[in-house]
Image: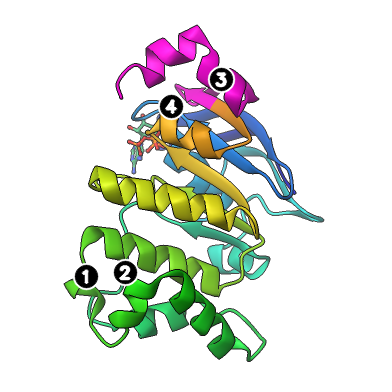
Amino acid sequence: MLIVRDLHTSYGAIAALQGVSFEVPEGSVVALVGANGAGKSTTLNTISGLLRPESGSIRFGENEIAGWRPDRVTGLGLVQVPEGRQVLGSLTVEENLLLGAYTRKDLDVSRDLRDIYERFPHLKKRRRQIADSLSGGEQQMLVLGRALMARPKLLMLDEPSLGLAPLIVKEVFRIIAELKERTTILLVEQNARKALQVANYGYVLEGGRVVQEGPADQLQGDPRIVEAYLGRK
Ligand code: ATP
Protein backbone atom coordinates (compact mmCIF):
# COMPACT_ATOMS: atom_id res chain seq x y z
CA MET A 1 0.00 0.00 0.00
CA LEU A 2 2.82 2.39 0.96
CA ILE A 3 6.33 1.88 -0.36
CA VAL A 4 9.08 4.29 0.66
CA ARG A 5 12.43 4.03 -1.12
CA ASP A 6 15.71 5.76 -0.37
CA LEU A 7 14.13 8.86 1.14
CA HIS A 8 16.40 11.82 1.87
CA THR A 9 15.12 14.88 3.75
CA SER A 10 17.18 17.72 5.21
CA TYR A 11 16.67 20.75 7.41
CA GLY A 12 19.16 23.12 5.79
CA ALA A 13 22.54 21.53 6.38
CA ILE A 14 21.15 18.82 8.69
CA ALA A 15 20.55 15.60 6.77
CA ALA A 16 17.76 14.12 8.89
CA LEU A 17 16.87 11.22 6.57
CA GLN A 18 19.71 9.55 4.75
CA GLY A 19 18.06 6.93 2.61
CA VAL A 20 15.05 5.54 4.49
CA SER A 21 13.25 2.59 2.88
CA PHE A 22 10.30 0.60 4.21
CA GLU A 23 6.90 -0.78 3.28
CA VAL A 24 3.46 -0.82 4.84
CA PRO A 25 1.31 -3.61 3.39
CA GLU A 26 -2.45 -3.15 3.35
CA GLY A 27 -4.15 -4.34 6.54
CA SER A 28 -0.99 -4.30 8.67
CA VAL A 29 0.35 -2.22 11.53
CA VAL A 30 3.97 -1.23 10.94
CA ALA A 31 6.00 0.39 13.72
CA LEU A 32 8.92 2.77 13.22
CA VAL A 33 10.89 2.81 16.43
CA GLY A 34 14.09 4.53 17.47
CA ALA A 35 15.60 7.03 19.87
CA ASN A 36 14.96 10.74 20.03
CA GLY A 37 16.22 12.42 16.86
CA ALA A 38 16.43 9.20 14.84
CA GLY A 39 14.24 10.68 12.10
CA LYS A 40 10.85 9.18 12.88
CA SER A 41 8.80 12.39 12.79
CA THR A 42 10.73 13.63 9.77
CA THR A 43 9.76 10.44 7.94
CA LEU A 44 6.05 10.91 8.67
CA ASN A 45 6.14 14.62 7.87
CA THR A 46 7.82 13.90 4.54
CA ILE A 47 5.20 11.30 3.62
CA SER A 48 2.31 13.60 4.58
CA GLY A 49 3.77 16.47 2.55
CA LEU A 50 4.65 18.80 5.43
CA LEU A 51 8.30 18.47 4.39
CA ARG A 52 9.69 18.08 0.89
CA PRO A 53 12.17 15.27 0.32
CA GLU A 54 15.39 15.96 -1.54
CA SER A 55 15.20 12.63 -3.25
CA GLY A 56 13.57 9.24 -3.00
CA SER A 57 10.24 7.73 -3.82
CA ILE A 58 6.98 7.53 -1.85
CA ARG A 59 4.49 5.30 -3.56
CA PHE A 60 0.96 5.17 -2.15
CA GLY A 61 -1.26 2.77 -4.09
CA GLU A 62 -1.08 3.89 -7.70
CA ASN A 63 0.43 7.30 -7.00
CA GLU A 64 3.97 8.59 -6.61
CA ILE A 65 3.34 11.23 -3.94
CA ALA A 66 6.82 12.49 -2.99
CA GLY A 67 6.64 16.29 -2.88
CA TRP A 68 2.82 16.48 -3.02
CA ARG A 69 1.04 19.11 -0.94
CA PRO A 70 -0.49 17.86 2.34
CA ASP A 71 -4.12 18.37 1.28
CA ARG A 72 -3.62 16.26 -1.84
CA VAL A 73 -2.00 13.51 0.21
CA THR A 74 -4.87 13.56 2.73
CA GLY A 75 -7.32 13.48 -0.17
CA LEU A 76 -5.94 10.05 -1.14
CA GLY A 77 -6.79 8.72 2.33
CA LEU A 78 -3.31 8.98 3.83
CA VAL A 79 -4.00 10.77 7.11
CA GLN A 80 -1.46 11.83 9.73
CA VAL A 81 -2.08 12.36 13.43
CA PRO A 82 0.83 14.65 14.29
CA GLU A 83 2.80 14.61 17.51
CA GLY A 84 1.52 16.80 20.31
CA ARG A 85 -2.28 16.48 20.22
CA GLN A 86 -3.04 19.47 18.05
CA VAL A 87 -6.68 20.07 18.81
CA LEU A 88 -8.31 23.36 17.92
CA GLY A 89 -8.69 24.47 21.50
CA SER A 90 -11.37 27.12 21.16
CA LEU A 91 -13.67 24.87 19.11
CA THR A 92 -15.91 22.25 20.66
CA VAL A 93 -15.16 18.54 20.61
CA GLU A 94 -17.81 18.02 17.94
CA GLU A 95 -16.51 20.86 15.76
CA ASN A 96 -13.02 19.31 15.96
CA LEU A 97 -14.42 15.95 14.86
CA LEU A 98 -16.36 17.47 11.96
CA LEU A 99 -13.22 19.21 10.74
CA GLY A 100 -11.70 15.78 10.23
CA ALA A 101 -14.29 15.11 7.54
CA TYR A 102 -13.77 18.33 5.60
CA THR A 103 -11.94 16.74 2.67
CA ARG A 104 -14.65 14.14 2.19
CA LYS A 105 -17.05 14.49 -0.66
CA ASP A 106 -19.79 12.19 0.64
CA LEU A 107 -22.44 13.44 3.02
CA ASP A 108 -22.62 10.51 5.39
CA VAL A 109 -20.75 12.35 8.09
CA SER A 110 -23.38 12.10 10.82
CA ARG A 111 -23.27 8.30 10.79
CA ASP A 112 -19.50 8.38 11.26
CA LEU A 113 -19.91 10.84 14.09
CA ARG A 114 -22.24 8.37 15.82
CA ASP A 115 -19.65 5.62 15.29
CA ILE A 116 -16.92 7.75 16.83
CA TYR A 117 -19.09 8.54 19.85
CA GLU A 118 -19.74 4.83 20.31
CA ARG A 119 -16.04 4.09 20.22
CA PHE A 120 -15.12 7.06 22.44
CA PRO A 121 -17.98 7.55 24.93
CA HIS A 122 -15.92 10.19 26.78
CA LEU A 123 -16.02 12.38 23.72
CA LYS A 124 -19.76 12.05 23.46
CA LYS A 125 -20.20 13.27 27.03
CA ARG A 126 -18.03 16.25 26.23
CA ARG A 127 -19.22 16.99 22.71
CA ARG A 128 -20.26 20.58 23.47
CA GLN A 129 -17.18 21.43 25.56
CA ILE A 130 -14.29 23.34 24.05
CA ALA A 131 -11.33 21.09 23.30
CA ASP A 132 -8.98 23.07 25.55
CA SER A 133 -10.96 21.91 28.58
CA LEU A 134 -10.16 18.22 27.94
CA SER A 135 -7.42 16.26 29.69
CA GLY A 136 -4.33 15.20 27.72
CA GLY A 137 -5.73 11.69 27.33
CA GLU A 138 -9.08 12.96 26.09
CA GLN A 139 -7.34 15.25 23.61
CA GLN A 140 -5.42 12.25 22.26
CA MET A 141 -8.75 10.41 21.81
CA LEU A 142 -10.08 13.51 20.05
CA VAL A 143 -7.24 13.69 17.52
CA LEU A 144 -7.64 9.95 16.86
CA GLY A 145 -11.39 10.43 16.40
CA ARG A 146 -10.83 13.42 14.12
CA ALA A 147 -8.44 11.40 11.94
CA LEU A 148 -10.98 8.57 11.68
CA MET A 149 -13.60 11.06 10.47
CA ALA A 150 -11.47 11.40 7.32
CA ARG A 151 -12.02 7.65 6.69
CA PRO A 152 -8.30 7.01 6.29
CA LYS A 153 -6.99 4.19 4.16
CA LEU A 154 -3.68 4.56 5.97
CA LEU A 155 -3.38 6.23 9.35
CA MET A 156 0.03 7.59 10.41
CA LEU A 157 0.31 8.08 14.17
CA ASP A 158 3.21 10.14 15.54
CA GLU A 159 4.00 9.31 19.17
CA PRO A 160 0.40 8.81 20.31
CA SER A 161 1.49 7.88 23.84
CA LEU A 162 3.88 10.80 24.41
CA GLY A 163 3.44 12.49 27.76
CA LEU A 164 0.40 10.48 28.83
CA ALA A 165 -0.10 8.72 32.16
CA PRO A 166 0.45 4.91 32.05
CA LEU A 167 -3.26 4.07 32.30
CA ILE A 168 -4.07 6.36 29.39
CA VAL A 169 -1.18 4.91 27.38
CA LYS A 170 -2.79 1.51 27.84
CA GLU A 171 -6.10 2.89 26.63
CA VAL A 172 -4.50 4.51 23.56
CA PHE A 173 -2.86 1.20 22.57
CA ARG A 174 -6.13 -0.65 23.16
CA ILE A 175 -7.76 1.70 20.67
CA ILE A 176 -4.92 1.27 18.15
CA ALA A 177 -5.39 -2.51 18.43
CA GLU A 178 -9.09 -2.02 17.64
CA LEU A 179 -8.40 0.36 14.76
CA LYS A 180 -6.19 -2.17 13.03
CA GLU A 181 -9.33 -4.16 12.21
CA ARG A 182 -10.44 -1.43 9.85
CA THR A 183 -7.46 0.57 8.65
CA THR A 184 -3.78 0.17 7.87
CA ILE A 185 -1.51 1.89 10.40
CA LEU A 186 2.02 3.31 10.37
CA LEU A 187 2.96 3.95 13.99
CA VAL A 188 5.90 6.02 15.19
CA GLU A 189 6.80 5.52 18.83
CA GLN A 190 9.57 5.95 21.33
CA ASN A 191 7.68 3.44 23.44
CA ALA A 192 9.09 0.55 21.40
CA ARG A 193 7.76 -2.10 23.72
CA LYS A 194 4.12 -1.06 23.31
CA ALA A 195 4.55 -0.32 19.62
CA LEU A 196 5.99 -3.76 18.86
CA GLN A 197 3.23 -5.41 20.88
CA VAL A 198 0.55 -3.96 18.62
CA ALA A 199 2.50 -4.07 15.31
CA ASN A 200 2.96 -6.87 12.79
CA TYR A 201 6.30 -5.64 11.54
CA GLY A 202 8.85 -3.12 12.78
CA TYR A 203 11.71 -0.98 11.49
CA VAL A 204 14.40 0.50 13.73
CA LEU A 205 15.64 3.96 12.73
CA GLU A 206 18.98 5.32 13.81
CA GLY A 207 20.62 8.49 12.53
CA GLY A 208 18.20 8.83 9.62
CA ARG A 209 18.62 5.25 8.43
CA VAL A 210 16.85 1.94 8.91
CA VAL A 211 19.32 -0.22 10.83
CA GLN A 212 17.13 -3.23 11.49
CA GLU A 213 13.74 -4.63 10.54
CA GLY A 214 11.68 -7.73 11.12
CA PRO A 215 8.41 -9.21 12.31
CA ALA A 216 7.44 -7.43 15.52
CA ASP A 217 7.62 -10.55 17.69
CA GLN A 218 11.14 -11.29 16.45
CA LEU A 219 12.31 -7.74 17.17
CA GLN A 220 10.83 -7.96 20.67
CA GLY A 221 12.94 -11.03 21.32
CA ASP A 222 16.15 -9.68 19.74
CA PRO A 223 18.77 -9.10 22.44
CA ARG A 224 20.15 -5.96 20.72
CA ILE A 225 16.69 -4.43 20.53
CA VAL A 226 15.92 -5.40 24.10
CA GLU A 227 19.11 -3.76 25.30
CA ALA A 228 18.81 -0.59 23.22
CA TYR A 229 15.08 0.05 23.28
CA LEU A 230 13.20 -2.31 25.58
CA GLY A 231 15.43 -2.31 28.62
CA ARG A 232 13.27 -0.08 30.75
CA LYS A 233 9.69 -1.07 31.48
P1 ATP B 1 11.59 12.81 18.22
O1 ATP B 1 11.03 11.66 18.94
O2 ATP B 1 12.44 13.69 19.07
O3 ATP B 1 10.59 13.58 17.39
P2 ATP B 1 12.48 11.67 15.81
O4 ATP B 1 13.03 10.32 15.66
O5 ATP B 1 11.08 11.88 15.38
O6 ATP B 1 12.64 12.15 17.27
P3 ATP B 1 13.14 13.83 14.09
O7 ATP B 1 12.29 14.81 14.84
O8 ATP B 1 12.64 13.31 12.82
O9 ATP B 1 13.46 12.60 15.03
O10 ATP B 1 14.58 14.47 13.92
C1 ATP B 1 15.60 13.94 13.08
C2 ATP B 1 16.80 14.87 13.06
O11 ATP B 1 16.43 16.12 12.45
C3 ATP B 1 17.35 15.23 14.43
O12 ATP B 1 18.74 15.32 14.30
C4 ATP B 1 16.75 16.58 14.71
O13 ATP B 1 17.58 17.34 15.55
C5 ATP B 1 16.66 17.20 13.34
N1 ATP B 1 15.51 18.13 13.24
C6 ATP B 1 14.21 17.83 13.46
N2 ATP B 1 13.41 18.89 13.23
C7 ATP B 1 14.23 19.91 12.88
C8 ATP B 1 14.03 21.28 12.50
N3 ATP B 1 12.82 21.80 12.44
N4 ATP B 1 15.11 22.01 12.17
C9 ATP B 1 16.35 21.47 12.20
N5 ATP B 1 16.61 20.19 12.54
C10 ATP B 1 15.59 19.41 12.88
Position of residue 105 measured from the top left corner of the image (x, y, whole percent):
66, 85
Q: Is residue 40 left or right of residue 69?
A: left
Residue 211 visible here: no
Q: What's the CA distance linking mark 4 and mark 3? A: 12 Å
- At x 47%, y 15%, the residue is 225
Residue 229 % position (x, y): 39, 20
Tell me the quadrant of ligand 1.
Answer: top left
Residue at 56% from the left image edge and 81% from the top image edge? 112
Which residue is denoted by mark 3 in the rendering? 219
**Frontmost residue, 176 versus 43:** 176
Magenta range is 204-233
What amino acid is at disc 3?
Answer: Leu
Asked if disc 2 and disc 4 are in contact, CB closer than 8 Å, the reply is no
SS at mark 2?
Answer: loop
Image location (x, y in percent) of residue 185: 59, 49
User: Tag 2: residue type?
Assistant: Val
Tag shown at residue 87: 2
Q: Which residue is mark 1?
A: 134
Does residue 169 sit above or below 197 in this rendering? below
Q: Secondary structure at mark 3?
A: helix
In the figure, 2 relative to 142: above or below? above
> How far apart, in angstroms, are the residues tagged by discs 1 and 3?
36 Å
Identify the secondary structure beneath mark 1: loop
Quadrant where the image shows the C terminus: top left
- Which label was assigned to residue 34? 4
Mark earlier in primary sequence (1, 4): 4
Q: Compute the Cα span from label 2 to label 4.
A: 26 Å
| Mark 4 within 8 Å of ligand 1, using the beta carbon | yes
> Of residues 128 and 207, which is closer to you in this image?
128
The reply to whether the C-beta atoms of the residues labelled 3 and 2 are less than 8 Å apart is no
Disc 3 versus disc 2: distance between alpha carbons?
34 Å
- First along the sequence among labels 1 and 3: 1
